[in-house]
Image (cartoon, helix red, strand yellow):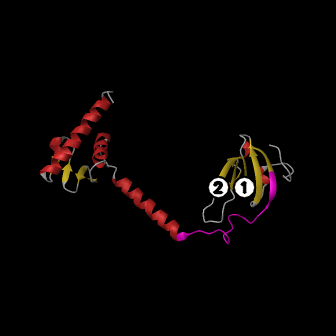
Amino acid sequence: MEGGNNSSSNNNPEELAVGCLLSIRTTLGDEFEGQVVTFDRPSNILVLQEPSKPSPRRNLRLLKANYIKDFTFLGHAQDPLDPNTCFLDLTALQQREDVAVRQAEADAERIGVGVTSEAQSIFDALSETLPVRWDKTVIVVMNEVRVSSPYHSESVVGGTPAANDRVKEVLDFERKRLQLRSSGGQ
């Protein structure tokens, strides 16, 4: 790695202080400017914050140091992670976390526990067009129709005749599709 104007004497990214403003050219021909956030020695990765309009969002670039062809020292700015100047919207972060947790819980409820992959495939097929949930190993459709193992048409009970027939129809179609897939006919 060669150094550009005003670069450190041995051009070692490990010696670039947090806050340094650099113009970097990579071995792949990319050219960009950024501020050093940190250098991770074990992974040989330089973390740079790219310049942007003042906003709570920041663009970070992770760059393997061995891809730096040369760099130019442009100056020094404040520590980009200084807690006195770094703004974190804790309310927005809490809301994002809450949404992510709710989504993860909803996703987990869609996975049957102690059921075969075939039963899960049937559940997934039913869920594409109908509201479904698991009640242990029983698939509950529209909160009224129940499909028990072995998940055949004869296993469908409850609900209105129309709802029952619709579940059987989707169930039969999915079983045929699974059978074709397992016989190699996809």
Residue 2: x and y in percent read 82, 44
Return the residue found at the far bottom. 84
Q: State the residue position of label 1.
A: 34
Tell me the crowding category of disc 2: few under 14, some 14 to 19, or many 20 or more residues within 10 angstroms, Cα based: some
Q: State the residue position of label 2.
A: 60
Q: Residue at the location (81% across, 55% down)?
A: 73
The three-letter code of the residue at mark 1 reads Gly
Q: Residue at the location (23% across, 52% down)?
A: 141
Residue 101: x and y in percent read 43, 60
The image shows residue 112, relative to residue 183, as above or below, that is below
Q: Quadrant of the N terminus?
A: top right
N-terminal-most mark, 2 or 1: 1
Q: Residue at the location (63% across, 60% down)?
A: 58
Residue 103: x and y in percent read 41, 58
Return the residue found at the far front. 53
**SS at mark 1 in the image:** strand
The image shows residue 155, relative to residue 53, as above or below, that is above
Residue 151: in sight, yes or no?
no
Would residue 4 be found to the left or right of residue 27 on screen? right
Residue 49 on the magenta segment: no
Residue 121: in sight, yes or no?
yes
Would residue 5 be found to the left or right of residue 108 on screen? right
Image: magenta residue range: 72-90
The answer to the question of whether label 2 and label 1 lie on touching residues, with beta carbons closer than 8 A, is no
Return the residue found at the far left. 161
Tell me the crowding category of disc 1: few under 14, some 14 to 19, or many 20 or more residues within 10 angstroms, Cα based: many
Q: Residue at the location (34% across, 50% down)?
A: 111
Residue 68: quadrant of the picture = top right
Residue 80 on the magenta segment: yes
The three-letter code of the residue at mark 2 reads Leu
**SS at mark 2 in the image:** strand
